[in-house]
Image: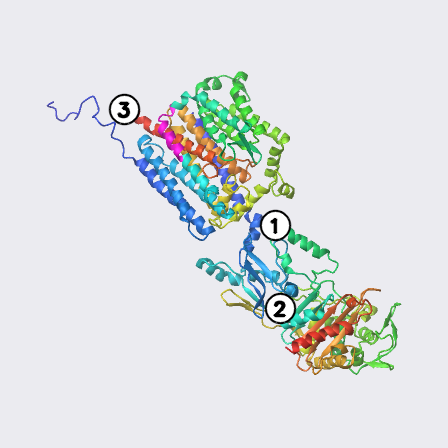
Amino acid sequence: MNRELKRVSIIALLMFVTLLVSSTIIQYVQASALAADPRNARTLYESYSVERGPILVDGTPIAFSQPSDDDYKFQRVYASGPLYVPITGYIPVNGEATGLERSLNEYLSGQSSSQFFDSLNRLISGQDPMGASVEVAIDAVAQQAAWDALGDYTGAVVVTEPSTGRILAMVTKPTFDPNSMAVHDSAQVQATYDGLLADPMDPLFNRATGGDMNPPGSVFKLVVTAAALESGRYTPESTFPNPAELTLPGTDAVVRNSSGGSCGGGSTVTLADALRLSCNIPFAELGMDLGDNAIREQAEKFGFNSEFLIPTATEVSTYPRGLDDPQTALSAFGQGDVRATPLQMALVSAAIANGGIVMNPNLVDQITAPDFNPLQEFEPSEFGRAISEQTANTMVQMMVNGVENGAASNARIDGVSVAGKTGTAENGESDPYTLWFTGFAPADNPQYAITVLVEDGGGLGQEGFGNLIAAPIAKQVLEAVLNK
Amino acid sequence: MSDVTGTPVATGTPPTGVRRIRMPQKLRNLEFWLLLVACFINAAAIVLVQLGAMRRVDTQLVLLGAGLSVLVFGLHIAMRFVARDADPFLLPIATVLNGLGIAMIYRIDIANGEAGWESAAVRQIAWSAIAIIAAIATILVIRNHRVLFRYTYLAGLVAIVLLLLPLVPGLGREVSGARVWIGFGDIATFQPGEIAKIALAVFFAGYLVRNRDSLSMVGTKFLGMKFPRARDLGPLLVVWALSMSVIVFQRDLGTALLYFGLFLVMLYVATSRISWVVLGLTLFVGGALIASQTLDYVGNRFANWLDPLNPERYEQEFGGSYQLVQGLFGLANGGLIGTGWGQGRPDLTPVPQSDYIIASLGEELGLAGVFAILALYLLFVARGFRIGFAGQDDFGKLLGVGLAFVVALQVFIVVGGVTRVIPLTGLTTPFLAAGGSSLVANWIIVALLLRLSDTVRNHPRLVIDG
C-alpha cells in the first residue's frame, strides 16, 4: 500500500507545484500585460486614487480634484470649463486625455521622475499621494476678453507676449464643457464624446492650434514681405506693375485684387502700399520673383513646418515643397496649399514685434510640487531669428500704416498705435471665406500680439472680410488688456 | 540473592506506573506555541485590514476573533486529554487558514459597506465557532476511528441522501446556476455536498478494505495492464454515474470532479492497480467531454478556460469569462508582494469572498502570500499522507489518505480554476472561503485526521504494553 501512497503523494505534490507555476505565470510573467489591458478597471482606478494636482490661472484653479465617494476617489472639476478647455483639456475615465491634462499628466498625477522622492516621502510619512500643480501663463482678463469678443463666431483667438512667447489667451469656439467628459460613468462619457464628434460644428477642435487647417490668406503676405526685405533686393518703396488682372503663366487662372481693380490706382504700386491695401496681384508678382524656396525658408524661420509643444502638441502649419510658378504666386497671398494655425500667425506677428526673434510659444509658467518646491520653471526660449531687427522695424511701420490708413482700419484704437494685418482667405469656389487678423500693440512697445481667426465667413459667406469681422474682435481684446 | 552484580531487577513484570509514565506532552506543547503564532497572525491580519481599508482599529471584530481563539484552544485542551499524541501541525494550519479567510471576508465587507450580523465576516466567525465545536465534539465522541468502519454502509447511505437533498423540491436552492444548496425559508443555506465528501471518504475506505481482494486479484491482462472483470466494474460505474448526475442535475462540475477523484485515488491505493485509474479517468473525461458538448454551462466553462480574454467571451452576459478575467486582473494587480491588506480592489471581482477568495488574497498579499497559503495546504496534506504511511490498519490508512487527498484535490480544483490550470468550477477553498457547510466539513476532517494521527503514534506503545 505504501508504494501506491508514495505515488499518490507525488501526484498531490505535482498538483501543488502546478498551482505554484500557474500563479507565478499570472502574478509575475503576465502581470504587466494584464495591467495594460484596457478592460482592467484596477489600473484605471489606480491612476485616479492620487489627488491630481490643480491647474491654476493667477493662483485660481481652473482644473482641480475634489474627493468623491465612488471608486475613483476624486472627481476632476473644471471651473469655467468651456472658457479654459483649449488649455486644460480633460481627463476621462475611458479614452485619452487631452490638453495639459495629457501633456503634463506625469506631473499632475505625481508620477514624474522629479516627484519620485516627494512621493516616497509621502508614502513613508503616511500622507496621501498628490500630484503637482501647474501655473499657466494665461491672463484671466485677456482670456475672458477674447472669449467675449469672439462672441458666437466659429474661430479662435490667441494672445501672446511677444518678448517671451507666453500664451496669455487661447480661446476656441464652438466649444464644450470638459466637465461633461469627466463624469465617472464610462458609458455616459462615450455618449457625450460620440455626440461631440458627430457635431457638424466640430466643438472638439482646438481651432487656435489645429482643427481643420485654414489657408492664411493675406496675413501670409507678412511672411512674403519679410522674405522680400530680407533678400536685400526689395525695400518698401520697390515698385510692381499694377494691372487689374493677372493671368498666371501657363494657366487660365486669373488673379484679382480684392477691390476688383488695380491696387490704389497708378501704373505701378510700391510694396508698402501693396501690403497696406492688401493687394493680391503685386504679391503674386513678388512671389514668383522670389521663388517658392525663398518664401519657404522665410516661413520656416517663422515656425512653419515645425511642431511646437506648448507643452501640449499643436498642429504643424505648412508651406509645401516643390511649387511651380502659378502655385508660388497663389502661395504668396496665402492661398494654394499654405495652411496656418492662429498660433503660427501669432508667432509671425510676435516675431516682428520682438525685433525679429521668434520665441517658443508656451502655456505654462511653473510646476510646483505639493510641498511648494518648484519642480520646473519655464524660462522664455528662442526658436530663432526670423528677420533682422531692421526688417522688423520696417515691417512694424508697414503694419501700423495698414491699421491707420489701410485694409486693417477697424483695429484702430484711440491713443494707441496698433500694428496689424487682415486676411480674407478663399476656401473653394463658393465656400465661405476664412477671416483673419494678426497684429500687436502698442506698436512702439509691443506688449500683446494677437491673432484672430473666424471661419465660415463670420456667417456672411463670401460677404465677410477680415477687416469687417476679425479686426474689431482684435481691437476689443487689445482694448481690454491695455486698459487693465 | 548474594550475586549483587547480576541483573538488578529480575522481576517478570514491569514496575508499576510504566504505562502511565509518558513523555511530557512535547507534541501538545509544540502545538500550543504554533497556535499562539497562528492566533497572532490572524489578529494582525484583521488589524491590518482595518488600518488598510478604514485607517482605524475597530476592536469589536478583534474581540470576536479572540472568541474563536478561545474555542481553538478549547480543542487543544481537549486533545491534551483524549488525543495526546495527535499531529501538532494540523490544528495551527487550519486555524491560520480560517483566520486569513475571515480577515479577507471582513475586508470585502468593508469595501461593500456591510457590518454587524448582516456582514459575511460575522457570519463566518459564527460558522467557524460552530465548526470548531463540531470538531471538538468529533474528537471527544470518536475515541477510536475503527468505530467508523462499522458504519461503512450507513456512511454511504448518508452520502447519497446528502447529495440528493438539494434536489428535493422546496428544500433545494439554486445559487448562480448550481443546485447544491439547501435552505429553510430564507435563512440558513447549507451545502450538504461538503459533508457528503466526509461520508464518502468513510464509505470508500470501508468498502474498499472489505472488497479489495476481488477488486485487485482477478482480471485479464491487456496492454501490459491487468484490467478488472466486467462484474467487478460495478462500484466504479456507480460512482461514475453519481458524479455524472451531479454534473447534469446539480450543474456542479467541481463537486463531481472532487468525488470521482477521491474515489479513484482511494481505489488505486487500496487495489494498487493502475488500470482502475486509466478506466476511471477515461470514463470521467469522456463524460465531461460529452457534457461540454451538450450542456451549455459546461461548454461555457471550457471556452472561458481556453480563451478568457477574447472580447466575445468577456462580454457574454451569462456564462462569460468576466469573473475569470477580473480574477486574473486582481492577481496581476497583486504582483509579487501584493497591494497590502485593504489596499487592493478585490471587491471588483464577482464573489470575492467565496469562490474567488484566493484571487482576493493573491491581490492583497501577492504571489508571496499565495505561495505561503499553498505551502500551508501542502503541509496540511502532507501530515494527512503521513498518517497513511505510518498507519497500522488499512481502514485508517485509507481514510487518512482519502481525507488528506480530498483537501488537496479541492484546493487544486479551485485554485487551478482561478489560475487557468483547469476550467473554472464553483468549489469552496477549504478553511478560507465564506460558507458554513464548508467550514464545518473541513473542521470535522481536521478532527478525524487528528484522531487518526493520535492512533498512529499511540499504537507502538500499546503493542509494548502488550
**Mark 1, other Cα within 10 Å: few <14 / some 14–19 / many ≥20:** few
The span shown in magenta is: B132-146
Q: Which residue is mark 2?
A: A363
User: Can the viewer see residue A303?
Assistant: no
Q: Position of residue A278 (x, y in %)?
A: 80, 76
**Which numbered disc, 3 or 2, marks the residue closer to the eye?**
2
Q: Position of residue A413 (x, y in %)?
A: 72, 80
Q: Which residue is mark 3?
A: B465
Q: In terms of sequence position, does the residue under pointer 2 or pointer 1 come before the other?
A: 1
On the rendered image, what quadrant is the N terminus of chain B found in?
Answer: top left
Three-letter residue code for mark 2: Leu
Q: Are marks 2 and 1 in contact (CB under 8 Å)?
A: no
* Residue toward you, A173 or A87: A173
Q: Position of residue B234 (x, y in %)?
A: 53, 19
User: Mark 3 — on which chain does it sit?
Assistant: B
**Mark 3, other Cα within 10 Å: few <14 / some 14–19 / many ≥20:** few
Q: Which residue is mark 1?
A: A38
**Mark 2, other Cα within 10 Å: few <14 / some 14–19 / many ≥20:** many
Do dots 3 and 1 share one subunit? Answer: no
